């Protein structure tokens, strides 16, 4: 196993365990520094392979598998340590990302950025699918939001991109990506496919989809919110506090401020990222 396995998901057939490793395990001064996802054969208990995420990937928080067992997703930060620290706008230093894995081929399909050009989506935490597989959701613990992504639309947009410019496939010119390798640097790739919903709670770190509803629990506010996945009504259907309204301790307040990207430039472009 790699360094600090932090989350795991079991395939529906029970044969494959996908493990997200929080940090990279190699030297920090190497040319390539990135955390990996481990794939384990549950029948033998042996490691099948490590999947390398894009250079700069780290601070993985969650991994989930689609109901049909064909895909996995993992949330993480994508650091641009190979660039000079002369600009913090537009993800120049840190981006927030989601990597999609194909479990049929046991390969990384691609990595999409969750930020917008002028607004970060700091600390992506929980990810998963609606029961019908139509919506891919991601909570943003730093900006107190949830993203709802049209999953079939995402797959179609990824499939339209050629591996090389010479390949005669139709590219989607509504984004800045011309080839597949452009996607992890494209802040516009999810345009038209994703809705960002602002939550009332602070620090959404857990979410479960049931039917047409998404139940989101926020760590710092001790609240539970219900989000309408069909968006046929107002996005937030219900908010409920789970505990009494107790004053926040000094330590807890410090942790909250450290993880609150709304206090930082462009909602977390240059913010410290969540630690455990």
Image: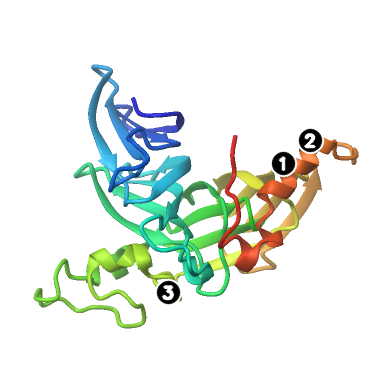
Give how far apart the Cα atoms at labels 2 and 3 are.
38 Å
- Name the residue that disc number 3 marks: 188
Q: For the N terminus, which image quadrant?
A: top left
- Name the residue that disc number 1 marks: 255
Percent of width and height locating residue 228:
62, 60
Q: Residue at x 52, y 67 (%)?
A: 88
Percent of width and height locating residue 71:
32, 47
Circle 3: element type: loop
- Name the residue that disc number 2 marks: 251
Give how far apart the Cα atoms at labels 2 and 1 are.
6 Å
Q: Residue at x 29, y 32 (%)?
A: 39
Compared across the picture, whether 222 is left or right of 22 comes to: right
Q: Give the label, 1 or 3, closer to the camera.
A: 1
Q: State whether residue 229 appears in this view.
A: no
> Toward the viewer: 156 or 38?
38
Q: Residue at x 45, y 36 (%)?
A: 22
Circle 2: element type: helix
| Disc 2 + disc 1, Cβ < 8 Å | yes
> Toward the viewer: 276 or 9?
276
First along the sequence among labels 1 and 3? 3
């Amino acid at each position: 196993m790699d360094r600090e396995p932090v989350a795991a998901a079991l395939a529906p057939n029970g044969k494959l365990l996908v493990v997200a490793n929080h940090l990279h395990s190699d030297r920090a001064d190497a040319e390539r520094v990135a955390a990996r996802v481990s794939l384990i054969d549950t029948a033998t208990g042996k490691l099948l392979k490590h999947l390398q995420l894009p250079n700069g990937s780290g601070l993985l928080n969650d991994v989930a598998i689609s109901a049909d067992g064909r895909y996995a997703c993992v949330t993480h930060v994508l650091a641009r340590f190979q660039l000079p620290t002369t600009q913090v706008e537009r993800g120049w230093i840190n981006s927030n990302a989601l990597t999609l894995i194909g479990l049929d081929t046991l390969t990384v399909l691609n990595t999409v950025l969750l930020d917008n050009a002028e607004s970060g989506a700091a600390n992506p935490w929980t990810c998963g699918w609606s029961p019908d597989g139509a919506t891919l959701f991601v909570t943003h613990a730093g900006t107190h939001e949830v993203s709802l992504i049209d999953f079939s639309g995402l797959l179609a947009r990824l499939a339209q991109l050629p591996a090389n410019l010479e390949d005669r496939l139709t590219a989607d010119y509504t984004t800045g990506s011309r080839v597949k390798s452009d996607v992890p640097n494209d802040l516009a790739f999810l345009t038209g496919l994703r809705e960002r919903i602002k939550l009332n709670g602070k620090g959404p770190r857990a979410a479960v989809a049931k039917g047409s509803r998404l139940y989101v629990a926020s760590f710092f506010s001790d609240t539970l919110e219900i989000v309408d996945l069909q968006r046929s009504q107002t996005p937030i259907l219900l908010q409920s506090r789970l505990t009494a309204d107790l004053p926040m301790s000094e330590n807890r307040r410090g942790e909250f401020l450290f993880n609150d990207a709304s206090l930082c430039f462009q909602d977390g472009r240059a913010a410290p990222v969540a630690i455990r």
